[in-house]
Every structure is written in C-alpha cells, then in structure tokens.
Amino acid sequence: MQTQTKKHDSNCLVAYGIDTFGDRWSFLVLRDMMLYGKCRYGDFLASEEQIATNILAARLKHLESEGIISKARDPENRRSYIYSLTEKGLDLAPVLLEIIRWSSRYMKMTARRRRLLERIEADRDGILADIRARRAILTAP
Amino acid sequence: MQTQTKKHDSNCLVAYGIDTFGDRWSFLVLRDMMLYGKCRYGDFLASEEQIATNILAARLKHLESEGIISKARDPENRRSYIYSLTEKGLDLAPVLLEIIRWSSRYMKMTARRRRLLERIEADRDGILADIRARRAILTAP
DNA sequence: AAGATAACTTGTTTTTTACAAGTGATATCA
DNA sequence: TGATATCACTTGTAAAAAACAAGTTATCTT
C-alpha cells in the first residue's frame, strides 16, 4: 500500500483530484461524513456498501495523510476515535453535490432522493452550511 | 470483467455515480473528451497517464454501455472510430469543473492552471457551452 | 475478574490492473 | 500490386490491490 504520493504523479488537476479523493471507497467515506455525519470507524464499516476493514483502515490513513480528514481521540470514550473533515475535506462538498445532481437525473428516483435533490436545487448554500456545521443532511439509509 | 451493472448495487445516489463514471480511468477518458476534445482510441492511449490498452478498451465499452459515450465509424477513415459524449456524458461537465476547482485550491498552480481556473470562475457557462459544442477547452498538455 | 466493544492488523484467496505481444481490417507507399 | 504501416483492438501472463476471515490490543461494562 502506498499512501504517500499520487499514483502516477500526473501533471493534471483532474488526475490530482481523482488520485487524492476519487477512489470509490475514499469517496464513500466522505459521503458518510458529509451526508450522514458519520465520524467513527464502526460507523463507516456499517455502511450499506460493506467496505472491508483493512481497506477502510487504509483509506482513512490515506485521507488523513492528504489532509482531507483528521483523527482525534473521543474524549468520552478512550477506545474510540473521532474522524472529522478538515477545511480541505469540506471543500469537496460541491463535488459531492454535483455527483448527486447528476445521479438524480439518471437513477430511478425515490421520494427520499427527490427531497434531497429538491433541497440541493433550492437551498444549496444551506446544505453547504450544514455540512460545514457537521449537521447531517440525511438520516441513516 | 463485469461491465453490466453496478458493483454492489448500492441504493445511494453517490455510489451510483461513482460506480457509473467514477473509476479513475473512466473519468480521465471523460476529461480527455471534455477538456481536450479527444475522440479516438489512439488519442486516449496517448494521454500522459499511460492507460493500458486493454483497460482503455474495457472502460470505453463500460462507458458506452452506461450511455455516457457513443461510438461511430469515422466517415473519413474506415479503420477509425469516433467516440463522443452523449447528453448523459455532457451532464458530467459540472462534476469535472468542481473537481478542477477543488484541485486548483490545493495543487501547486502553474500559469496554465491559473488561466483555466480563472475562466471557470468568470465564464462557467461559456465553458459548459464549449464542452457541449465539442470545442476543446485546453490544447494538449 | 470476565466478557464485551472499538479500532484496528495480519494472513490468504480472489479479482483487477499492468505489461507485453499478437491479430485483423483498412490505408498508404514503392 | 505487393509490402509495409496504422488503427483499434484481443489475448496471455505477471504484479498489485481488494475481499474475506481470523486475530490482537486497549478500554469499558458488569
């Protein structure tokens, strides 16, 4: 596992982004944090996509080494850690919202999804503010 | 190789997007099309990230099966094919632009990159229009 | 003190990717 | 017109990464 630098050290802004946060599992962790307010190892493990524990550990380490998330002891339970988005991580919220907007156009809509899309269109700044304030946008799926 | 359906058939809009277009190589192909106006197999192969030919073939097939790109014979050279973005693919332009904006904040800036970022901020609609009109945004890197 | 819990690590199998070489249908050149 | 080049792939194999299963350590609860 190489968490250090970009895989191919491309000279491109797009490749930089993809190599930094664009791996499937990394991005699903970020989704969990931004949309559901998740912040613990066990929370991420419990997501519906079923990430393997070694992969999750590697991704958290990678995202932390890239400065996208940070890790701190939970003051109320010394077994636990709390992961949170840094400024660099919070800045990824617009990417997340555009992916959701795109998928909304092309994935079959449920009522829940429609509500989220409507809120993105009508209250984008409110959503971005909620993400920054660590307020969950959705309840657990 | 399974090009048919989503890997985990997640119920989530974000996972849907990632599974459909979010693979590293798929997205770099889309970047080539949107930013550089590339449309031929050999053009994609020649990108600086050095995709392997079998992987490129698989990704093109996948993107086509997802309806994001389409493939047609080149009327001027019967050995060649022309790949182009469908409406579904063009709708990914905002995702691309947000990734570029994010990376612009956190990757060391060159003059070329700064110009692209400035244009995204000042003329977003113009860029989106250029992408739809198949006009390259950048010249080859 | 015994068992449970949280956050991992380690070892192994399976899948995916990367690399290298080859193929078939045009096209171009001598 | 036959020989060579080009384009868009395919196939086979080695290397890397992901998935799966089991184990570890520190802390907490009863």
Image (tube, coloured by chain):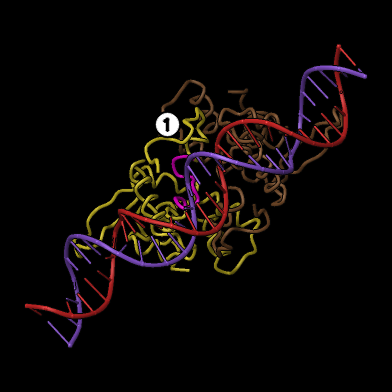
Chain colours: A brown, B yellow, C purple, D red
In this rendering, is residue C1 above or below B36?
above
Judged from the image, the secondary structure of the residue bearing numbered disc 1 is loop
Q: Which span is picked out in magenta?
A: B19-27
Is residue B3 among what the camera can see? yes
Q: Which residue is mark 1?
A: A107
- Say which quadrant the C terminus of chain A sits in: top right
Residue B83 versus residue C4 in the image, above or below: below
Q: Residue B38: x and y, percent?
A: 37, 61
Q: How many marks on residues?
A: 1
* In the image, residue B25 lies in the stretch drawn in magenta: yes
Which residue: 46% across, 55% down? B28
The three-letter amino acid code for the residue at tag 1 is: Met
Specify whether A136 is left or right of A113. Answer: right
Residue B85, percent across and down? 35, 50
Is residue B124 rendered to the left or right of residue B54? right
In this orientation, does residue A39 appear? no
How crowded pointer 1 is (Cα within 10 Å; few <14, some 14-19, many 20+) is rated as some
Residue placed most toward the observer, A133 or A23: A23
Residue D18 location (% of width, % of height): 56, 42
